[in-house]
């Protein structure tokens, strides 16, 4: 209780000082010290480094107070910790040394890997990996190639777009896209790339399971709201749930997996080579 009361008292003093008119005024008119906790002072020059230039006076005051409160909170906790923890509990030298060693090891690994990593992944290697690991690419949700349109229900271009959007004729599709870009509230096409159906469902403010129930046999999803806005999607292709995703969808993931495996192989070889060299040079001896 004494510790909690101590913290509350210090924080109350700091917060009260921060919100006072006198303190706020000092941000802008004279006075180098804007806050103080114990013997530690925060100067206006410190605030100048963290408060963006060109913002309004109100935003500057708000951000200043937020920063001061955060600064004070850290110091208050540190003060209490210094007072309440035992000498052994305050000794963090081992943790700091462990962190230093881990950080240096990580930095050298990154330097070693960056100098040697081959990031080129051929199409043949992608195909080979994809064929050998099909089960990794079974999707939990459908993938779709689709066009999405948000447009006023009374727009004269709605029906022409609707008719041309499903066409197999390139000229019709180009015209539909042109009309949609010029007259729709929003138009998005995933005609040439597979997309998680969740992305399409968000456009309707629905979960994907509900969206799936709205797709008709021709691949249309349509919803008209009370404001007279039509949300319309035409799903040209669908890769069903639990099916293996097409390679073009998986290619970026496969590339990352291959490069990640190469990184790990380099790190493993580095560790083995360093141990081998240390043994041969007499720097590493097992008794």
Image (cartoon, rainbow, N blue to C red):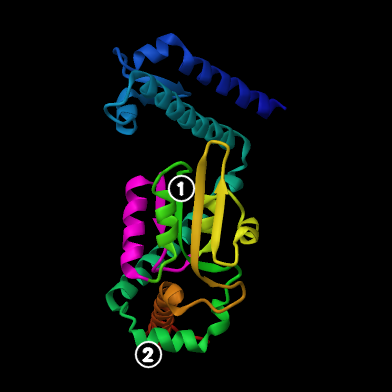
Residue 239 seen in this snapshot: yes
**Residue identified by numbered label 1:** 150
**Residue identified by numbered label 2:** 280
State which mark lies toward you, 2 or 1: 1
Within 10 Å of disc 1 (Cα), the crowding (few <14, some 14-19, many 20+) is: many
Residue 170 is left or right of residue 94, and the answer is left
At which x and y percent is residue 83? 59, 33
The residue lying at 33 percent from left, 22 percent from top is 56
The residue lying at 36 percent from left, 23 percent from top is 60
Q: Nearer the viewer, residue 201 or 108?
A: 201
- Residue 254 vs 86, above or below: the answer is below
Q: Residue furthest right?
A: 1
Say the numbered circle drawn on residue 284: none
Distance CA(mark 2)–CA(mark 1): 70 Å
- Residue 217 vs 14, above or below: the answer is below
Q: Residue furthest top?
A: 22
At which x and y percent is residue 44? 32, 23
Residue 181 counted in the magenta span: yes
- Residue 87 vs 73, above or below: the answer is below
Residue 203 counted in the magenta span: no
Span shown in magenta: 169-195
Secondary structure under tag 1 reads strand
Mark 1 or mark 2, which is nearer the start of the sequence?
A: 1
At which x and y percent is residue 58? 38, 19
């Amino acid at each position: 209780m004494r510790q909690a009361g101590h913290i509350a008292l210090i924080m109350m003093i700091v917060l009260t000082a921060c919100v006072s008119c006198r303190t706020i005024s000092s941000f802008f008119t004279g006075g180098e010290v804007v806050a103080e906790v114990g013997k530690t002072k925060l100067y206006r020059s410190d605030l100048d480094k963290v408060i963006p230039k060109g913002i309004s006076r109100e935003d500057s005051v708000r951000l200043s107070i937020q920063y001061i409160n955060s600064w004070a909170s850290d110091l208050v906790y540190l003060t209490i910790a210094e007072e309440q923890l035992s000498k052994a509990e305050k000794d963090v030298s081992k943790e700091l040394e462990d962190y230093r060693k881990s950080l240096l090891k990580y930095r050298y690994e990154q330097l070693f890997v960056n100098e040697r990593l081959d990031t080129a992944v051929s199409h043949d290697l992608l195909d080979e990996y994809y064929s050998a690991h099909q089960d990794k690419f079974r999707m939990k949700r459908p993938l779709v190639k689709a066009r999405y349109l948000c447009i006023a229900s009374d727009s004269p271009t709605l029906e022409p777009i609707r008719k041309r959007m499903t066409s197999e004729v390139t000229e019709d599709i180009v015209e539909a896209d042109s009309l949609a870009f010029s007259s729709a509230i929003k138009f998005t096409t995933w005609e040439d790339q597979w997309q998680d159906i969740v992305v399409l469902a968000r456009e309707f403010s629905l979960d994907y399971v509900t969206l799936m129930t709205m797709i008709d046999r021709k691949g249309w999803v349509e919803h008209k709201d009370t404001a007279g806005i039509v949300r319309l999607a035409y799903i040209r292709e669908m890769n069903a749930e639990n099916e293996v995703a097409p390679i073009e969808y998986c290619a970026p993931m496969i590339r990352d997996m291959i490069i990640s495996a190469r990184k790990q192989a380099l790190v493993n070889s580095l560790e083995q080579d360093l141990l081998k060299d240390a043994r041969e040079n007499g720097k590493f001896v097992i008794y």
